[in-house]
Image: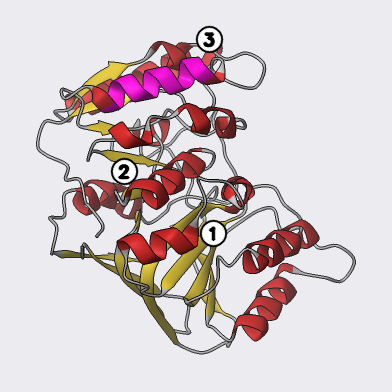
Amino acid sequence: MIKYPILKNNARIGVTAPSSGVPSFLHDMFKQACNRMEERGYSVTVGDTVWTQEKAKSAPAKVRAEEFNQMMADDSIDLIIPPWGGELLIEMVEHVEFAAIKKKWIIGYSDTSGLMLAITLKTGIATANGTNFVDIRGEYSDETTAMWEKVLSTKEGESVLQHSSSHYQKAWQHGNPTPHVFHLTEETSWKTVSGKKEKVEGRLLGGCIDIIRHLVGTPFGDVKIFQKQFINEEPILWYFENCEMNTTDLRRTLVQMKLAGWFEECSGILFGRSDANDPVGDYTVEDVYQDLADELGIPVIYDFDCGHQPPQNTFINGAYAEVEADGEGKGTVLQYFRS
C-alpha cells in the first residue's frame, strides 16, 4: 500500500541540502525565499548544510544524511524541501535511515529525485517531484508551479487534476527575475510519438533520468520488489526528464533500465522538456522515443511539464495517474491518492 503525507495549514518547512548547498553570493536569494514562505504563513527551519558548498556538494555525505535524518525524525517539521538539486546526492543515500522515514512530504526535482525515488521504492511512502525551494521566492507563482500546494494537500482517497502550462521557460535568467521567477516565453506543446491523442495510466514513478539511473542494480532501486510489496503488480507509468545527456547516452540509459526489468508491466513513458538531448550524428531524441515505443509497445508522451525548463506539474511517486495528451499540444494529469 502507498502511504500519502498531507500538507497542513501553517506547516513548518525543513530546508536541508542533501546535494548542493547555496554559495555565499546567493545567500540573499535564498533568504528571500525564506521570507516569502513566511509571509505566506509557513514556518521555515534551515539546516546548516544549506549555507555551505564545497567540492560540488554542501557537506560530506554522512553530514548531509544526518541532517536529513534529523529533519525526518523531527515531528515539528511537516515537509522537507531542498534549496535545489546538484550533482552528488547519490553519495548520501546509503546513510539514510529508511526504516525511520516518517510520513511527511519531500518535494523537489533534479538531483533530489534520486533520494525521493529511493524512499518511495523502499518504504511505499509517496514523494513529490516538483518545485525546489528557491523557485518559489517570487511575489507569486505561475498557475502550474502553484499547484504544488493543492497537490500536497490532497487527502488519501481523493484526486487532483493538473493541466499543461500555457508557456514555458527556455533558459534561466537569474539576473533578471520576474514577479513569478520564471521567464515563460515559449508556447508549451505536449507531443506524442504516435502523433495522435494518447491516454496512459498507472502508478507514477520517475525523476531526473541522469540521476535515478544510478539506482539501477542497487538496493535502492528494486522496482520489482516495490511492485509486489506496495502496488499489487499494477502497471507503472514512468516519467523522466533529461538534464544533461545527449541522445546516445539517453538511449544507453533506457536500454539499461529495460534490461534491469524497470519497464516490465509498464503502461507508458513520459519525457519532460529538455535543452539537452543533443543529437549524435543523425540520431535525434525523437528517434530515441520512437525506438522505445516500438520496443515496449507502449505510448510515449514527451515535452510535458517536468524538469529543468519550468514550469512543472507536481508528480507524486506512487500515486495512480491518468495522463492525457490531446494531440494538439495540451494535456492533463489526474492523480488519485489511492493506497
Question: CA separation, marks 2 and 1?
Answer: 23 Å
Pick the residue in front: 274 or 165.
274
Name the residue that disc number 1 marks.
240
Work out how far the residue at label 3 is from the one at label 1, CA to CA, in angstroms.
32 Å
Residue at image position (13%, 64%) is 158
Q: Residue furthest right?
A: 281
Q: Position of residue 74 (x, y in %)?
A: 22, 22
What span is in magenta? 62-72
What number is the disc on residue 287?
Answer: none
Q: CA–CA distance between discs 3 and 2? A: 25 Å
Q: Earlier in the sequence, mark 3 or mark 2?
A: 3
Q: Which mark is residue 141?
A: 2
The residue located at (27%, 17%) in the rendering is 45
Residue 173: percent from the left, percent from the top?
56, 36
Q: Is residue 256 visible?
A: yes
Residue type at mark 1: give it.
Phe
Q: Is residue 180 above or below residue 34?
A: below
Q: Residue 63 magenta-drawn? A: yes
